[in-house]
Image: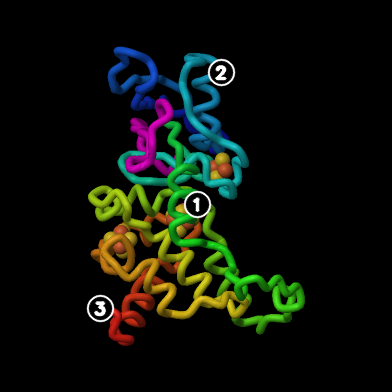
Amino acid sequence: MADGTAPRKLIFKILRYNPKVPGDRPRLQSYQLEEADGMTLFIALNEIRDKQDGSLAFDFVCRAGICGSCAMMIDGRPGLACRTLTKSLGAEITLAPLPVFELIADLSVDTGKWMRGMSERLETWVHLKEGEVDLRRIEERMDPDLAEEIFELDRCIECGCCVAGCGTARMREDFVGAVGLNKIARFRLDPRDTRSDEDFYELVGDDNGVFGCMSLLGCHDVCPKQLPLQTQIAFLRRKMVSQGMK
Ligand code: SF4
Ligand code: F3S
Ligand code: FES
């Protein structure tokens, strides 16, 4: 290693299971790998797949914490594999797919299907007046502070870590998760969106939304983009309660 120490021997215990293969059963499979300088889980998994086991399934696109596709359970905690250095972990590393989402195979899950369903239910797009497509309104200058606030919430990469780390999401199939509540907070701020607070309440003012959240805060702890999820959820809840919506 660069610091002159001998490289560690890493042991990866990876949950293997392909639900589409008849008779396949979930099992932990071990792989050994010598640690290299600056090794991320992305690098390690690719090395395992290239040199030891071409059948190992996992997802990566950007390798830079932008696409959200490499989220997995890393030693029991949701995180992005491309942003996790092996040196931040012990010599034995357990990897498993994110829970809640549909399993494709091994470490690969279909977050897209879940996110699309949630986005359609919450209508996560700017709603203009019915029948009106006013480009001037869409392109109107926005107060820079407000634009900054919206941009902050727009940094969500839909990785699914907050959903995987949430006890409510595991119990309630239709719970929109911190990712969904964050989107509602984002569109509520947007001056171009013509929906009222009551409209937003219709979407998340129940146990699958704001009132299903038990403030477990796992979402806030694991979000790789450090979004202010706790603050946003608490704000939405207070707002709805103060308006007599619950
Ligand atoms: Fe991922 Fe954070 Fe977005 Fe949740 S809110 S999907 S943890 S980026
Ligand atoms: Fe889940 Fe986060 Fe609420 S972990 S219960 S959405 S505070
Ligand atoms: Fe895109 Fe990790 S590969 S976030």
Quadrant containing ligand 2 reads bottom left
Visible in this render: residue 224? no
Residue placed under numbered mark 3 in the picture: 246
Whether the magenta-drawn stretch holds residue 197 is answered as no
Q: Earlier in the sequence, mark 2 or mark 1?
A: 2
Residue 44 position, x and y percent, is 50, 29
User: How far apart in space, not on screen, are marks 1 and 3 (Cα)?
Assistant: 29 Å
Amino acid, disc 2:
Asp
Please name the residue shown 54% across and 38% down the image. 3
Above or below, 87 against 45 in this view is: below
Please say if the residues under marks 1 and 3 sit with CB atoms less than 8 Å apart.
no
Residue 149 position, x and y percent, is 56, 75
Residue placed under numbered mark 1 in the picture: 158
Q: Is mark 2 within 8 Å of ligand 3?
A: no
Q: Which residues are magenta?
A: 87-106
Please name the residue shown 47% across and 42% down the image. 113
Visible in this render: residue 14? yes
Amino acid, disc 3:
Lys
Residue placed under numbered mark 2 in the picture: 50
Q: Secondary structure at mark 2?
A: helix
Whether the magenta-drawn stretch holds residue 92 is answered as yes
Between 102 and 87, the one nearer to me in the picture:
102
Between 128 and 62, the one nearer to me in the picture:
128
Q: Is the C terminus in the top left, top right, bottom left or bottom right quadrant?
A: bottom left
Please name the residue shown 29% across and 13% down the image. 23
